[in-house]
Image: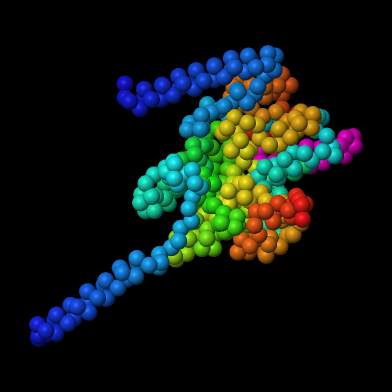
């Protein structure tokens, strides 16, 4: 039988261990999720509350994908293209992170939670206008993966390279 | 009357009203010019219905022999071929081709014709019949598509298609067009530009053909007796390629 003193000791250790991650969570262990476009995150909120989206976004996307793919419904809500358009934003240097990199909106959480997604095997991971610059660049260099690795080319650089702007 | 029923009626009423007012607006903008965009506009929230069947009519006599504008336009719109340079490890035969120009020669007369060939959007599509997962499917409005979400890449549909219209993606792609998702391990083909058609526009190839002033391609609703395509088909007829297969194709040809 465990004495009362021993029990109290165990209890203290147990409570301590449980509290430890809670305390440290207040630090920076969680995923850093990039901000959406300013107008969406500040003025007009996301189409649903963040908590609901975090939990159920996959269900919304799956429901919409069948409606669009099979029935031709083209509304903007729950469209993956619209999500990407708003949520995948350049960092302060104007660089776009690609899928798989922590800086990408989807990957920031999916990397953290170690949940693999295959949406971007087929779908573009960038908003249309951001992808256009990379498209133009690719024509000159088919080794696209090297060029865009780690999002190391800024939008400005791309414009210079693709449109032969001022050097 | 159930609320669902009355909703449907309201929607129908709205659609009619919108179509009428749009037609009036079209007349007001430019008398004498038919805005065919107006004719097949659908609200974004509307589902496609079986009261429409999209089709295409191609006049091979108007189709210019050296011209590949329809192919280029399709590639640009949907991001295959030269437009997406990430399909680099596949051989030319393996690379996707949604639409191709075909030259046919009559051996007896020596008459040479050139025509674009793509998915013929069959009513009884063999690709849909053979698909083991239901990924190869036909929309209610007659457009035949691959649902890549459930395609397992078995390629039965490619073997079943008499028109060799489908391609398989062998490698990891990136930077696809946002409107035309396509990727490794799935089969793809002409979508008749569903994303454009659902917004009331013509497919990219048809638009390019009229822009090149050839006007060899007409797109429209085969079930609407007053559409340009139906009127032309009634007047001059149109043939199916391999009509003997009885597939009732949505793409028809003149001058074959």
How many labels sit on residues? 0
Image: A49 above or below A117 = above
Q: Is residue A166 left or right of residue B141?
A: right
Identify which residue is drawn at 49% across, 46% down: A38
Q: Position of residue B100 (x, y in %)?
A: 75, 44
In magenta, the rendered stretch is B102-120
- Magenta segment includes B19: no
Q: Quadrant of the N terminus of chain B?
A: top left
Observer-nearest of A153 and B99? A153
- Magenta segment includes B110: yes
Image: B145 above or below B220 = below
Q: Is residue A4 left or right of residue B215?
A: left
- What is the image's colouring? rainbow
Q: Position of residue B182 (x, y in %)?
A: 60, 51
**In this view of the protein, can residue A107 be seen by the observer?**
yes
**In this view of the protein, can residue B152 be seen by the observer?**
no
- Quarter of the image where one finds residue A101: bottom right
Q: Quadrant of the C terminus of chain B?
A: top right
Observer-nearest of A136 and B8? A136
- Quarter of the image where one finds residue B22: top right
Identify which residue is drawn at 71% across, 36% down: B205
Observer-nearest of A25 and B83? A25
Observer-nearest of A149 and B186? A149
Identify which residue is drawn at 72% across, 40% down: B73
Q: Is residue A99 left or right of residue B109?
A: left
- Quarter of the image where one finds residue B144: top right
Q: Position of residue B36 (x, y in %)?
A: 65, 24
Identify which residue is drawn at 14% across, 80% down: A8
Q: Position of residue B45 (x, y in %)?
A: 47, 33
């Amino acid at each position: 039988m465990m004495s009362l003193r021993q029990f109290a000791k165990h209890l203290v250790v147990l409570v301590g261990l449980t509290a430890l991650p809670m305390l440290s969570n207040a630090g920076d262990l969680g995923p850093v999720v990039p901000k959406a476009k300013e107008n969406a995150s500040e003025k007009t909120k996301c189409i649903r509350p963040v908590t609901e989206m975090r939990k159920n976004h996959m269900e919304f996307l799956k429901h919409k994908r069948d409606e669009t793919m099979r029935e031709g419904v083209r509304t903007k809500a729950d469209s993956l293209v619209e999500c990407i358009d708003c949520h995948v934003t350049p960092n302060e240097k104007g660089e776009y992170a690609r899928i798989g990199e922590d800086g990408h909106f989807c990957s920031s959480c999916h990397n953290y939670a170690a949940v693999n997604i295959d949406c971007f095997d087929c779908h573009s991971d960038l908003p249309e206008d951001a992808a256009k610059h990379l498209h133009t660049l690719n024509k000159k260099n088919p080794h696209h993966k090297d060029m865009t690795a780690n999002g190391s080319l800024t939008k400005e650089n791309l414009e210079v390279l693709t449109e032969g702007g001022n050097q | 009357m159930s609320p669902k029923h009355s909703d449907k009626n309201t929607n129908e009423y709205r659609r009619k009203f919108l179509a009428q007012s749009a037609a009036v607006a079209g007349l007001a903008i430019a008398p004498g010019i038919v805005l065919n965009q107006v004719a097949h506009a659908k609200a974004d929230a509307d589902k496609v219905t079986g009261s429409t069947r999209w089709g295409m009519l191609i006049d091979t006599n108007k189709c210019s022999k050296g011209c590949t504008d329809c192919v280029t336009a399709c590639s640009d719109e949907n991001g295959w071929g030269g437009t997406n340079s990430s399909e680099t490890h596949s051989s030319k035969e393996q690379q996707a081709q949604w639409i191709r120009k075909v030259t046919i020669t009559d051996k007896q007369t020596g008459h040479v014709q050139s025509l674009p060939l793509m998915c013929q959007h069959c009513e009884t599509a063999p690709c849909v019949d053979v698909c083991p997962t239901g990924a190869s499917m036909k929309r209610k409005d007659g457009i035949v598509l691959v649902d890549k979400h459930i395609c397992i890449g078995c390629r039965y549909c490619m073997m079943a298609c008499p028109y060799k219209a489908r391609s398989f993606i062998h490698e990891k792609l990136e930077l696809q067009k946002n409107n035309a998702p396509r990727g490794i391990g799935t089969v793809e083909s002409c979508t008749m530009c569903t994303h454009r058609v659902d917004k009331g526009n013509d497919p990219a190839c048809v638009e390019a053909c009229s822009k090149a002033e050839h006007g060899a391609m007409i797109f429209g609703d085969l079930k609407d007796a007053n559409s340009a395509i139906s009127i032309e088909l009634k007047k001059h007829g149109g043939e199916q390629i391999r009509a003997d297969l009885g597939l009732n194709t949505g793409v028809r040809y003149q001058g074959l």
